[in-house]
Image: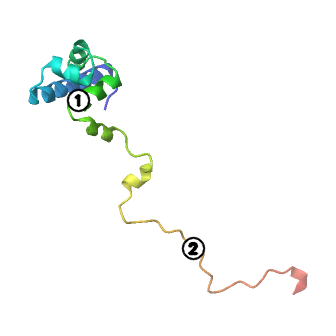
Amino acid sequence: MSNSEGAIKARSEAIGEGLAAQRLSRNLTQRELAAQAGISLNTLRRLESGENVSLDTLIRVMNALGLGDRLDVLTPPADVRPVDRIRPAGVERKRASARPSPHAAPPWVWGDER
């Protein structure tokens, strides 16, 4: 995904349109949702049009729409290492153990001690 200004603006607009669709599916006006979220009407209008708003505003609106639990997918659990996400479940690497050599070499001695 590109981090260009155009790509970010398009993604912001898509999120705003999605939130507006969620609001309309619940038969809420912008004024009602803004009041439930504890934000101003103009702030909600900016969010729905894809303009820059704070993370706090997004969280408030998503909570008011009953979508706050969906924000959890944005941050993976900290206790999971990245390599654990790609390793197949149930397969754990075993450490290699040193095997005793079947033909043990005689102990080393100085050349004149033979």
The scheme the figure's colours follow is rainbow
Q: Nearer the viewer, residue 109 or 71?
A: 71
Q: How far across and how far down the image is residue 98, in percent?
A: 60, 75
Q: Residue at x 89, y 84 (%)?
A: 113
Furthest residue to the top? 42
Q: Of 6 and 58, which appears nearest the observer?
A: 58
Amino acid marked by disc 2: Ser
Q: Residue furthest right?
A: 112
Q: Which element carries disc 2, helix, strand or loop?
A: loop
77 with respect to 69 (left or right):
right
Question: Considering the numbered disc 1 on the image, is that residue within a helix, a strand or a loop?
Answer: helix
| Residue displayed at 8% across by 26% down | 27
Image quadrant assignment for residue 23: top left
The quarter of the picture where the N terminus appears is top left
Residue at position x 87%, y 87% from top?
Answer: 114
* Residue of label 1: 64
- Residue that appears at 41% across and 54% down: 84
Residue 78, placed above or below residue 55 = below
Mark pair 1, 2: CA separation: 57 Å
Residue 37 circle label: none
Position of residue 20 in the picture relative to residue 88 (left or right): left
Position of residue 109 measured from the top left corner of the image (x, y, whole percent) = 84, 81
Residue 73 is left or right of residue 104, and the answer is left
- Residue under label 2: 97
Amino acid at the residue labelled 1: Ala
Q: Report the front residue among 40 and 98.
A: 40
Q: For marks 1 and 2, give the one nearer the viewer.
A: 1
Tell me which label, 1 or 2, sits earlier in the chain. Answer: 1
* Residue 49 in picture, x, y percent from top left: 20, 17
